[in-house]
Amino acid sequence: MLFSFILISFDSYSQDEISFLNGSINNCNSQLNFIQINDSTATYTNVYSDAKITTSKIYYSNKIKNRWCQGLEYLNTASNLSIANLSLSDNKGFNFYTKCNDGITNCDIYFTLKDKEFSLSQINSEAFSADYNTQPFFFTFNKKSFLYFVSDRKGGFGGLDIWFTIIDSLGNFSFPINAGPNINSSADEITPFYTLHSKTLYFSSSRDDIGLGGFDIYSSSGSTNRWTSAINLFYLNSEHNEMYFSLFNERHAFFSSDRITDSSFCCNNIYSFEFENDIVDVQIINKKISSSEFTPLQIYFDNNSPNARLFDVMKDTVPSYKKFYIDYFKNRESYYTDNNDSILDFFFDSSLKDGYTGLISILENALLDLSKGLFVELTIQGYASPLASDNYNKKLSFLRIKSIINFINEYSDLALAQYILDSSLIINELPLGESESFLNVSDDPEDVKKSILSMDAILSRKVTILKVESYR
């Protein structure tokens, strides 16, 4: 039995300290996406609904004597489309927002640059062709620009997922990348908000495993698609819907909820909350067990590597992952012929390297726990693209896992090998073949561009360190 649990400081925070936003913004319509820009200015979205139509507009509001004044229209759209979800860049170079048709069932992300308006589907129809792209959130991290957004596109975990795209120095948008399994689930994940100060992503999810009802607000630490397990912010949530969390100066929090605090209001209204400290005091307390902060970790392989046609020869002598990692970089240039350069740069310089360095970090922590007399258990899954037969892909997945195990055996001058022999270090192997590959990866060997060189194919050739757990 695992004895881990989450402890949250309920003594410090309570529902009573959550306030209906002071001022004239809340009304009998829905108010969403309240973003405080400076000490006296904020933007938000107002949604109007009647029996025939639902529409929305973006407003800005000024704060006078601690009261937020009724908003004035911020962005005027001449079309009959609804406009919502404003995200301003730090240098005001980009203004991102969503436009949707009547009924808000078909949405696209737009941005203005130098007083000109563009939509993502217009500038990159292949990457942003899904019917529903919405809720953009823009930020700059480590000198790279990122746009997180919500979409129902294929290749996700189910329902609405949070995705991101990288924007290069020329304004090109990379092919979207899923934020990963620690953020997304088979339910809906929406309204991303990232804060650089604490490197925390806030979002809402309708998952019901630890939810209180409807959409709940969650947080996760990390960046890009490497995140810690999501934590439910119970002190903000209720049995109703809570979404569009935002922070100003790391202390003043805002969110939308349809909880009813005044009979003259309805739908979603804005609520505020002040943290006593710069960051919420949430601690994960573990008894008799600890879990690695680096999992799940994605470790990627080049096409047909190792060669499963040599399975009977290689299964006992497959090289360690270090060889395949180096070989992948040697073959790097062959992938640039049919892909966006910025997304490939990100894959090789971040995703591929992060897998290798993350594996080393996991082994360093495991060795430390083993030296203290703890048992350590790793669960490793192997995947392949759908290019070959099911049987071949199962063998390929097995060999990829085996290369990781051999890397573990050789690590730090065989420091972990004895722990494997005496079963202190337990490794669970799950060679899944193509069973969880991206649905839109081609299995046509003649279509090299889609079956081998495409980003979806690249991301489907991997091993995942699913769990690392230490216990007595």
Image: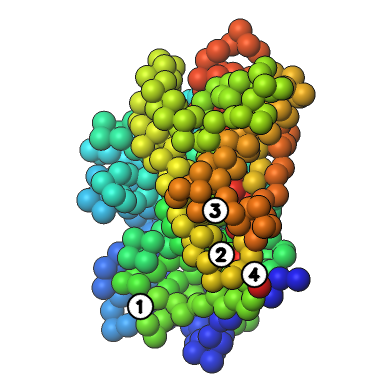
Q: Mark 4 and mark 1 in contact (Cβ < 8 Å)?
A: no
Q: What amino acid is labelled 3 in the image? A: Leu
Residue located at (31% from left, 72% from top): 249
In the rendering, which numbered label is found on residue 278?
1
Q: What amino acid is labelled 1 in the image? A: Asp
Q: Mark 1 and mark 2 in contact (Cβ < 8 Å)?
A: no
Q: Secondary structure at mark 4?
A: strand
Q: What amino acid is labelled 2 in the image? A: Leu
Q: What amino acid is labelled 4 in the image? A: Tyr
Q: Mark 2 and mark 3 in contact (Cβ < 8 Å)?
A: yes
Note whether residue 286 is visible: yes
- Nearest to viewer (mark 4 / mark 3): 3
Residue located at (65% from left, 13% from top): 444
Give percent across and percent down for residue 266: 61, 72
The residue to which callout 4 is attached is 471
The residue to which callout 3 is attached is 416
Give percent across and percent down for residue 18: 51, 83
Give percent across and percent down for residue 325: 45, 32
Residue located at (76% from left, 71% from top): 1
172 vs 284, nearest the viewer: 284
The residue to which callout 2 is attached is 370
Displayed quadrant of residue 216: bottom right
Across the whole image, how many numbered discs are drawn on residues?
Answer: 4
Q: CA distance from mark 2 to mark 1?
A: 36 Å
51 vs 68, nearest the viewer: 68
Q: Secondary structure at mark 1?
A: loop
Q: CA distance from mark 4 to mark 2?
A: 10 Å
In the rendering, which numbered label is found on residue 426?
none
Precedes in sequence: disc 3 or disc 2: 2
Note whether residue 119 is visible: no
